[in-house]
Amino acid sequence: FNVTGKIFLVTLLPFLVLRTLDWCLPSCRRYVAGGRCKSTARLEGKVVIITGANTGIGKETARDLARRGARVIIACRDTAKAEAAASEIRAETGNQEVIVKKLDLADTKSIREFAERFLAEEKELHILINNAGVMLCPYSKTADGFEMQLGVNHLGHFLLTFLLLERLKQCAPARIVNVSSLAHHGGWIRFHDLQGEKCYNRGLAYCHSKLANVLFTRELARRLQGTKVTANALHPGSVYSDLVRHSFVMTWLWKIFSFFLKTPCEGAQTSIYCAVAEELESVTGQYFSDCQPAYVSPRGRDDETAKKLWSVSCELLGIQWD
């Protein structure tokens, strides 16, 4: 290049870079955001329970369903944060039927008390969204001695669903939505060390619990055939939230790459889709991501493991669920 050409290139290059970014970044962001729930279904007269709805995708799911007119029960351990979230949602949507009830999924006594209060105070239940979860916890146990991630993510929701199922059947058609994760691909059910007492890795423990969600959904759907109560699982995507708070490294990475993560509103779309989409009224036992069917790992399709996990879960919780 001659001097004139070099000057022209240096002058033009920043403009070209900016124009390229201006074109690429929105496209990249749309890809990250994934699918959106396009259903316009209204939910007046419907009662919904969402666990862990004081923050993240649970809160955004509650906001959307409240906007559709549902009576939304926010079930959380931290009632102060839950009340703040409920107040915000009521003010924004104009729906005053957003209620907080205390629920600690790490304590079966709390789960039973929640279910007892709910069944005494509410006559209907149409949608149960098992959304709450913990991730990458250092080794710890629930009040009942279960490894924390398995105890909260799987066993807590397993018991809650058991206690509320008859009410769902009475109000059918009804839906159960289990928030799982793409991480289920890395999990397996270690029946010989289910509580991680012999060997524990916090990342793998999370994967195991998310696989348990998928297997629970599969077996639950099979058992609910003919009841008009459906059960589906989903992957919300990689969402920028406080779920990774137990890992300094993941928290740091989440901040650096936040542009490539879904917002809580974007992450809530598949939960909302599974809860309201008209085309899913009779669809059950499936797994979704970005508001469409997604691939399930071979371990997540193992019916024998699903049945055994069901039996072991009942034994651990001291219930009979035939």
Image: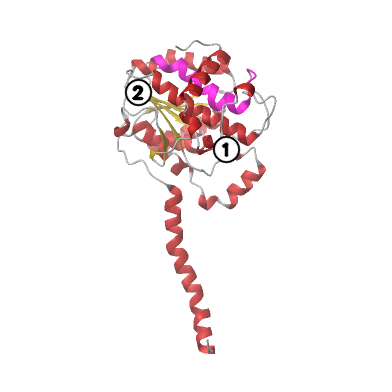
The residue drawn where x is 53% and y is 79% is 10
Q: Nearer the viewer, residue 146 or 164?
A: 146
> Which one is earlier in the sequence, the residue at label 2 or at label 1?
2
Residue 245: image location, x then y, percent: 62, 39
Q: Name the residue type under label 1.
A: Leu
Residue 300: image location, x then y, percent: 48, 30
Q: Which residues are magenta?
A: 144-166
Q: Nearer the viewer, residue 87 or 318?
A: 318
Is residue 162 found inside the magenta-colored segment of the image? yes
Q: Name the residue type under label 2.
A: Ala
Q: Secondary structure at mark 2?
A: strand
Q: Which residue is mark 1?
A: 243
Residue 242 visible in the current orientation: yes
Is residue 160 found inside the magenta-colored segment of the image? yes
Residue 99 visible in the current orientation: no
Q: Decide: is 290 above or below 205.
A: below
Residue 56: image location, x then y, percent: 51, 38
Farthest residue, direction right: 198
In terms of image quadrants, where is residue 186? top right
In this image, 178 relative to 196: left or right? left
Q: Decide: is 208 above or below 37.
A: above
Q: Secondary structure at mark 1?
A: helix
**How dense is the environment of label 1, judged by Cα within 10 Å: few (below 14), some, or many (20 and up)?**
some
Q: Quadrant of the C terminus?
A: top left
Q: Which residue is mark 2?
A: 174
